[in-house]
Amino acid sequence: MKRKSIFERIPHAITMLFGIIVLVSILTYILPAGTYERIIVDGRSRVVPNSYKIIASTPINVLDMFKAIPLGFKAGVEIIFIVLAGGIMFGFMEKSKAIENAVGTLINKLGLERKNLIIVIMTFIYGLLGVTVGYENNIALIPISAMLSLALGGDLILAAGISVGAMTIGFGLSPINPYTVGTGHKLAELPMFSGALLRSVLCFSSLSVMAYYNVRYFNKITNQPHKSLAIGLDTNNLELSKPLKDYTLNFKNWLVIGIFLLGLIAILYGVFNLNWHINELSAVFLIIGLLCGIVSKMTATKISETLLESVAFAAPGAFLVGFATSIKVLMEMGNIGDTISYQLSNILEGLPLYLAAICMSISQTIINFFIPSGSGQALATLPVMLPLGESLGLSQQITILAFQIGDGISNLVNPTLGGLIAMLSMCRVPIDRWIRFIFPVLLIILMFAFVIMIIAVATNYS
């Protein structure tokens, strides 16, 4: 019998997340409980440097471990519902045939001989959305990549590479990311989004790697279909139902697409001008879905049935988001998050300058698996890392870059990141298969990022 590779041994997402839940619970018996003092600045909790102290241990027993799961669903309810709302919206658009007809017409016009070009262009479009718009804000656009990929002859893994991979890279390495770079610059009192050129080079190069890898994977599965990582995944309601030459857009389709585009414009305006967050986005998704049902002349019964069918498809992803969020709850219950940050910062002291910069990124990667929120991690770690970096001889800009690299790149495989789990679920891709696909990309981008870090240190990037 053929021996399984290490990637084929990656467990199911539920198994993986439950393993992390058990591990965190065990760590509360091994690591001392500790905390930094925190102050409220501009309405947000910020760590006070050099204030870490050990407190009474709060180990997690079996009952508390399982109690953290419903508490995780409570804490992650906003992301859980946006997964459901996005699924509902797409369900109505799919029933109207507007997306299928739009994708079929687009490919018919561009021609199948330009498949590779289409993949590259779409990878960069999704990447640009991540750079400029955000992360969960784009969740409703994920199923479109699934239909596009299948129409080109690709699979759902390729769809995830085009959309989830590109948006994760674009958002994580964005030179104008308000949650990581913006928060870091505010904490360091640096000009907002300064040093953008080097970050832009890193972001564009990483998206180029993703685009090349997507094309390479597509050509491989085209020539050798048995090497597809998506074999057995559900493509129901995502595949084109007729030949490309038969696709056209009728008036009803244009109405649905128009409603969808107006909804996206409203979301962009709300995010940038009205301080909208996830709940407002969920509301807009529901409005788009309802309007699509009305202009498609669905009866009240058909609208109700479509809604429940859509929820059924989105439910597994929504469940995984809540399951992943329970890890954050456990860290707070066990009071070991600050301890991990403190111990990792101590390890950096005394290291050579270049190695210290790279290890700072690695330490942020480790912390990211326990504190997956970019802004939350920045507020928890940068007040500690910024003065530490200066004592090591690293500029504040380098410390923030190290944080961004550690946080942004590891998000590609972070099972505790609710947004990643949610987006993969919209592509119907399990995280174990996703890791098998994306891990080589992560390593290549990480190595390039370390080269960028060395250049930053050598030029005293500031």
Image: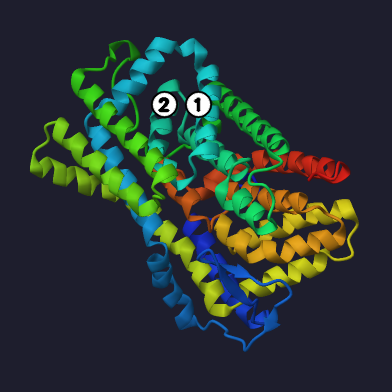
Q: Tag 1 or tag 2, which sits nearer the N-term?
A: 1
Q: In the rendered picture of this protein, how many numbered marks are placed on residues?
A: 2
Q: Is residue 369 visible?
A: no
Q: Is residue 310 left or right of residue 213?
A: left
Which of the labelled discs sits on residue 148, or is there none? 2
Image quarter of the N terminus: top right
Alpha carbon of mark 2 to alpha carbon of mark 1: how far? 9 Å
Q: Where is residue 213 in the image (x, y as percent from the top left)?
A: 62, 30
Q: Position of residue 44 (x, y in %)?
A: 53, 65
**Observer-nearest of 19 and 441:** 441
Q: Eyeballing the image, is 386 above or below 330?
A: above
Q: Which amino acid does label 2 sit on?
A: Leu
Coordinates of residue 206 in the picture (x, y in percent): 66, 35
Location of residue 120 (image quadrant):
top right
Q: What residue sits right under mark 1 in the picture? A: 122
- Residue type at tag 1: Met
Q: Are marks 2 and 1 in contact (CB under 8 Å)?
A: yes
Position in image of residue 132 (x %, y %):
52, 37
Q: Is residue 448 above or below residue 354?
A: above
